[in-house]
């Protein structure tokens, strides 16, 4: 269950002292979140979305798609591990060796699970908005929808048919047929 542990002000540096026990640790504004290993359906959804994004990025050469576990550190009190995310290429179109080398995300995606729903929908949405991540998606496996948030609009767009992603510098969008995505990932 994703729940805060002891009451204290956690930092990214504090995470270095935690055991490598198979859990995912994140710090959101000083609060430690602990998440157990994901389900098989969760991992299938990550992989299917990752393939779609990776194929699109291979053609458009805008950045690279990565999956968790991977630390994305925004500040000493903000470290997240998005399930799927896209970073721009570093200097001169090269792949970066550390997140700090690019310092920003083009897209962050969380695959919803019962233990992470509140953190994903409330805390992480706020953090991604404040950090200027152009798009944040929440993939709801039960509802078979994708929720899209942007820094420019506090409202959440819930999509069931298709979603288009047009990152800066792209000439054409990635269009995902949401029904086909869920059928391929889960059925």
Image (spheres, rainbow, N blue to C red):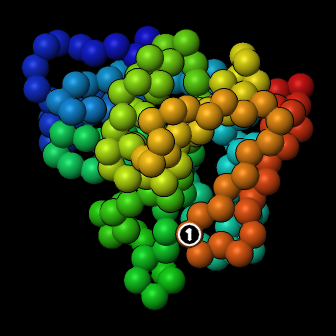
Left or right of residue 50, residue 15 in this image: left
- Quadrant into which the N terminus falls: top left
Q: 71 and 92: which one is in front? A: 92
Residue 182, by quadrant, is top right
Q: Residue furthest bottom?
A: 92
Please name the residue shown 52% across and 40% down the image.
149
Q: Is residue 78 above or below residue 97?
A: above
Residue 45 spot, x, y in % from top left: 71, 34
Residue 4 spot, x, y in % from top left: 28, 15
Residue 24, by quadrant, is top left
Residue occupied by mark 1: 168
Query: Would you say residue 124 is visible in this rendering?
Result: yes
Q: 40 and 148: which one is in front? A: 148
Instruction: Using a 10 Å C-alpha cutoff, classify the residue at mark 1 as few (fewer than 14 neighbours), some (14 to 19) or many (20 or more).
Output: few
Please name the residue shown 66% across and 39% down the image.
46
Residue 144 spot, x, y in % from top left: 76, 24
Please name the residue shown 65% across and 72% down the image.
170
Q: Is residue 56 above or below residue 183?
A: below
Q: 173 and 99: which one is in front? A: 173
Local SS, label 1 = loop
Q: Is residue 47 above or below residue 146?
A: below
Query: Would you say residue 51 is visible in this rendering?
Result: no
Q: How many marks?
A: 1
Q: Is residue 104 above or below residue 127?
A: below
Q: 147 and 71: which one is in front? A: 147
Please name the residue shown 40% across and 83% down the image.
91
Residue 148 spot, x, y in % from top left: 59, 39
Residue 187, by quadrant, is top right
Left or right of residue 186, residue 130 in this image: left
């Amino acid at each position: 269950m994703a729940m805060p542990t002891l009451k204290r002000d956690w930092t990214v540096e504090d995470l270095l002292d935690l055991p490598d026990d198979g859990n995912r640790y994140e710090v959101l504004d000083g609060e430690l979140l602990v998440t157990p290993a994901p389900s098989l359906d969760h991992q299938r959804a990550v992989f299917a979305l990752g393939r779609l994004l990776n194929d699109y990025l291979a053609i458009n050469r805008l950045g690279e798609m990565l999956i968790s576990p991977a630390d994305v550190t925004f500040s000493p009190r903000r470290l997240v591990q998005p399930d799927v995310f896209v970073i721009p290429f570093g200097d001169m179109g090269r792949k970066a060796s550390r997140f700090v080398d690019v310092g920003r995300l083009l897209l962050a995606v969380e695959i919803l699970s019962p233990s992470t729903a509140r953190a994903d929908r409330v805390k992480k949405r706020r953090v991604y908005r404040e950090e200027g991540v152009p798009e944040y998606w929440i993939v709801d496996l039960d509802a078979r929808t994708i929720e899209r948030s942007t820094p420019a609009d506090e409202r959440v767009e819930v999509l069931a048919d298709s979603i288009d992603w047009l990152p800066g510098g792209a000439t054409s969008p990635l269009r995902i047929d949401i029904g086909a995505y869920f059928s391929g990932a889960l059925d």
